[in-house]
Image (spheres, helix red, strand yellow):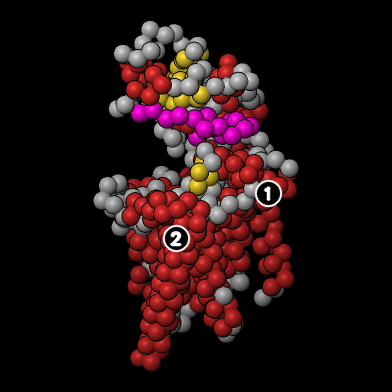
């Protein structure tokens, strides 16, 4: 085994992935969930590092400040906060996941490693989140890192590597809170639960490892939580500490939210084809699980599949769910799915034919998607400025290469899978970067609206008021475009009396659909001084003098 060559190839995977996850991103507007992190970064850049991120100058309870500190470091390096600094920690973690997955599988089979990496990157949810801010991608790197340390430590007989996972528990908590530590600890416990045993003593030894890792994880969770509560009280007092508990614990365990099958439903599109292929592979190969005691590949396959299942099933229990929570399972399931494609048995042969047909035709399908999107988005003004003939030429070129690879790799199924998957990834990435992301920037533009309103407010500015607009959603989209601190007023629809006592001049922003709320107020007969779209929603602006 050429470890030096594998390390060089691992570095190549990392650099290529980092390019894919950061290309075209510099000072683009933050969209969706990224807007909150953009505001976190701006306020930290203006006021310095803090234990918790802040909005409106107040600590925000849902996350520790760790991830924002990473972005803050890159912003200091660039000299100003921008979207690249915002997403770079996630992009680095995502590239690290692909590189580490390759390092894990390459000593056994390079083709298996390459296909697993490509399947991971082809997962729509992962590819999109790798180009945005996503703490779960950082947890994904820690989960896979925990698995790799345990696996390599067991192979090399290194206790140091096996003990090195415990700092990962703490880092996961520092990044993602209790959820992060629980996921990494769950990977460690699942890994040892499926170890090799040939006698009752071996089984008892593995059981002890599971119990010890679980107990250590529980103790670290308690210690980290106690420390977090102390830091919360230091940052914002007792009331803020209660908010931290509500947001990071009780709020995630309430009985409102999504049903148990929510993530399985997502696997049919956001996590397709990795999750369906992985589950099918585990089912078809269930009779070979006992071979893990003698076959290294089967042992690794079973452990990876079990860890992926642990994350999928474990996070399906709480009702509070988000599509990106289960991202840490993707590289593990991708390894299982790649194994099933490379060594298909029974009806997995048909699944491989379907997958090959899908990736072989994907560049051509992208042309269809391109034309449909152009027809739909152009009439709404969301179509980006791009050369349609050039885009079609790129996709046709990729389709031609796919057909060529199909013909020339008839007797090399592994190479065919890798090459067609690579071309499919190129087509999917090109469509995302050149069409979908720029179209979203146009559809959910906030800079134009904010620029117009701030020009009206002038140098004196006055009081900024959001009427029946969410403090954590709409207002964030506005605030992230300001180059100064602002303390806006928030007025709910249930009590409009504060409108009468606002310091003048005041600038009131509300959704156009909520215009009826102004009945009986000083603005009932007023004419909007500006109308536009904020984050894709029609809004009106009124001036109170």
State which quadrant residue 27 falls in. Answer: top right
- The stretch in magenta equals 476-492
Chain-order first, disc 1 or disc 2: 1
Question: Mark 2 = which residue?
Answer: 229
The picture places residue 60, in percent across and down from the top left corner, at 48, 47
- The nearer-to-camera label among 1 and 2 is 2
Q: Is the residue 201 above or below the residue 228 in the image? A: below
Of residues 127 and 401, the one nearer the viewer is 127
Element type at marker 1? helix
Element type at marker 2? helix
Residue appearing at x 55%, y 32% in the figure: 486
Of residues 161 and 349, the one nearer the viewer is 161
Question: Mark 1 = which residue?
Answer: 74
Instruction: Tell me if residue 317 is in the magenta stretch.
Output: no
Taking the image as shown, residue 294 lies to the left or right of residue 141, namely left
Q: Find the distance from the CA under tag 1 to the CA under tag 2.
A: 28 Å
């Amino acid at each position: 085994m050429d470890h030096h060559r594998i390390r060089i190839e691992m570095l190549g995977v990392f650099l290529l992935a980092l390019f894919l996850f950061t290309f075209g991103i510099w000072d683009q507007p933050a969209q969706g969930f990224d807007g909150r992190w953009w505001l976190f970064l701006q306020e930290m850049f203006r006021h310095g590092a803090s234990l918790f991120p802040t909005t409106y100058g107040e600590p925000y309870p849902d996350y520790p400040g760790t991830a924002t500190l990473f972005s803050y470091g890159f912003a200091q390096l660039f000299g100003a906060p921008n979207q690249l600094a915002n997403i770079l920690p996630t992009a680095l973690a995502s590239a690290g996941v692909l590189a580490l997955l390759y390092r894990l599988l390459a000593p056994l089979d390079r083709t298996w490693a390459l296909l697993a990496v490509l399947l991971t990157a082809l997962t729509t949810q992962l590819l999109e989140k790798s180009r945005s801010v996503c703490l779960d991608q950082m947890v994904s790197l820690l989960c896979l890192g925990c698995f790799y340390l345990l696996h390599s430590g067991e192979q090399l007989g290194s206790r140091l590597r096996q003990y090195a996972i415990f700092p990962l528990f703490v880092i996961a908590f520092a990044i993602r809170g209790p959820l992060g530590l629980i996921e990494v600890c769950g990977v460690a416990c699942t890994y040892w639960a499926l170890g090799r045993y040939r006698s009752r003593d071996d089984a008892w030894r593995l059981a002890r490892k599971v119990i010890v890792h679980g107990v250590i994880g529980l103790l670290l969770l308690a210690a980290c939580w106690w420390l977090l509560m102390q830091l919360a009280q230091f940052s914002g007092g007792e009331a803020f500490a209660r908010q931290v508990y509500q947001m990071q614990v009780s709020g995630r365990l309430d009985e409102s939210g999504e049903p148990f099958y929510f993530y399985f439903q997502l696997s049919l599109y956001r996590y397709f084809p990795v999750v369906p292929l992985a589950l099918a592979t585990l089912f078809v190969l269930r009779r070979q699980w006992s071979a893990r005691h003698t076959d290294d590949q089967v042992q690794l396959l079973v452990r990876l599949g079990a860890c992926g299942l642990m994350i999928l099933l474990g996070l399906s229990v709480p009702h509070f769910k988000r599509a990106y929570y289960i991202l840490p399972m993707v590289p593990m399931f991708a390894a299982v799915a790649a194994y099933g494609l490379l060594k298909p048995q029974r009806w997995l042969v048909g699944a491989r034919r379907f997958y090959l047909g899908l990736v072989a035709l994907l560049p051509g399908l992208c042309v269809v998607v391109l034309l449909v999107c152009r027809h739909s988005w152009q009439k709404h003004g969301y179509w980006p400025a791009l050369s349609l003939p050039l885009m079609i030429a790129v996709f046709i070129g990729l389709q031609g290469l796919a057909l060529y690879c199909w013909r020339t790799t008839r007797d090399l199924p592994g190479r065919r899978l890798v090459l067609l998957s690579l071309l499919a990834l190129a087509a999917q990435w090109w469509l995302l970067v050149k069409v979908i992301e720029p179209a979203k920037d146009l559809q959910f533009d906030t800079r134009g609206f904010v620029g117009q309103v701030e020009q009206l407010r002038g140098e004196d500015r006055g009081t900024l008021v959001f009427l029946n607009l969410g403090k954590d959603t709409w207002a964030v989209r506005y605030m992230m475009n300001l180059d100064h601190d602002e303390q806006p007023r928030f007025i709910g629809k249930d009590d409009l009396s504060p409108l009468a006592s606002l310091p003048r001049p005041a600038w009131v922003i509300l959704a156009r659909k909520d215009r009826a709320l102004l009945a009986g107020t000083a603005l009932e007969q007023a004419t909007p001084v500006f109308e536009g779209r904020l984050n894709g929603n029609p809004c009106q602006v009124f001036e109170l003098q």
